[in-house]
Image (tube, helix red, strand yellow):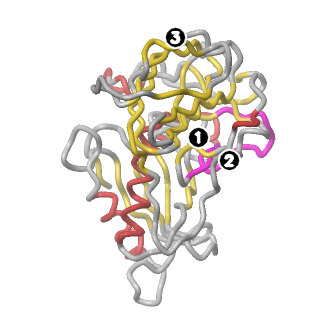
Amino acid sequence: MMVAGLVSSAVAAPSDSARFDDGRAAFAVQFGETVVRHRIMAVTALPDTAIRIVAEPGLTEGHYRTEAPEPHIIPLSSSSWRFATPSDPGLYPIVVTDAQTGATVRLQVFVLAPWDHEGRRLNGYRIGRYEREPRNGRAVYEPPEGFVKVTAETKDALVSPHFRLNQFLCKQTDDTPQYALVRPRLLRHLEQVLAAVNARGHDASTLHVMSGYRTPYYNRAIGNTTEYSRHLYGDAADIYVDANGDQRMDDLTGDGRVTTADARDLADIVRRIPTPGDDRFRGGLSAYGSTAHHGPFVHLDLRGRRVRW
């Protein structure tokens, strides 16, 4: 496994600023089927596979170079490469640079730890059992083929301009290694939500992710009977705005209180952001109020169809 010297040292940590930087890249990079439009983004692949990488897909001009783990990347043209994923799960960053402007896109390539769903543990880490049949035959409910391996060296790695891997981990243990799912489409959407929050005048450097990935085991342990919860598939997040760092939702409405109205305000922001390929948000969305254990928050997921509750 690659030593994570390139994990995050070249990328500044999220910070407050008078003018919010949405992290959008000067050019796009396609990694397999995933198009990356931010300066840094996590992408995933199984071990020992060949992935095509293209800078500015659809354009024929331009010259780009890469910084990548040797000897796994092979140039195909001045703007495309073939990446042979290593056998060992881990983080293998690839930096694509526009040779003319110096602009960069950093792919945080997580080579997954494969799982055949035999048994309930992966290298000792308790996963539990996924439903073998996808719900209503839909591909988004296929059991995952592998998981991001989370180590002490990689858990703080940036997975997008304003989010880190440790924000999405299952809460069943603090020990490492752990295993998780992190979907680029969720990261892209959260970045858009954060940009919209800042456009509303709230100075937030990230969103608080109260719950991201959950293993099926943990999901059942906390009393959740939803066997197809999107948290199990890595494209759901329970979020709130916490610019002041008090571990609770901020007063978004400006009425001097923190209530469900603030969660509804955040949900309204989410609702206005379209999902890729559509003109509106298609996914699960709900605003929740306070309990004895937490303040107001919003659940969002990218299941591909509109659901409200």
| Nearest to the observer: residue 256 or residue 16 | 16
- Whichever of labels 3 and 1 marks the residue nearer the N terminus, that label is 3
Q: Amino acid at mark 2?
A: Lys
Which residue corresponds to mark 1?
214
In the image, is 257 to the left or to the right of 113?
A: left
Could you tell me if the residues under marks 1 and 2 are in contact, i.e. CB atoms within 8 Å? yes
Query: In the picture shown, does residue 9 fall above or below 288?
Result: above
Callout 3 crowding tier (Cα within 10 Å): few <14, some 14–19, many ≥20:
some
Q: Residue at x 42, y 18 (%)?
A: 133
User: Which image quadrant is residue 52 in?
Assistant: top left
- Whichever of labels 1 and 2 marks the residue nearer the N terminus, that label is 2
- Whichever of labels 2 and 3 marks the residue nearer the N terminus, that label is 3
Q: Residue at x 32, y 20 (%)?
A: 137
Separation of residues labelled 1 and 2 (CA atoms): 8 Å
In the image, is 45 to the left or to the right of 300?
A: right
Q: Which residues are magenta?
A: 163-179
Q: Which mark is residue 136?
A: none
Query: In the picture shown, does residue 248 fall above or below 84?
Result: below
**In the image, residue 140 lies at what x, y percent?**
38, 28
Query: In the picture shown, does residue 161 fall above or below 6?
Result: below
Q: Amino acid at mark 1?
A: Arg
Which residue corresponds to mark 3?
50
In the image, is 275 to the left or to the right of 107?
A: left
Q: Which mark is residue 171?
A: 2
Of marks 2 and 3, the one in the foreground: 3
Q: Residue at x 38, y 23 (%)?
A: 33
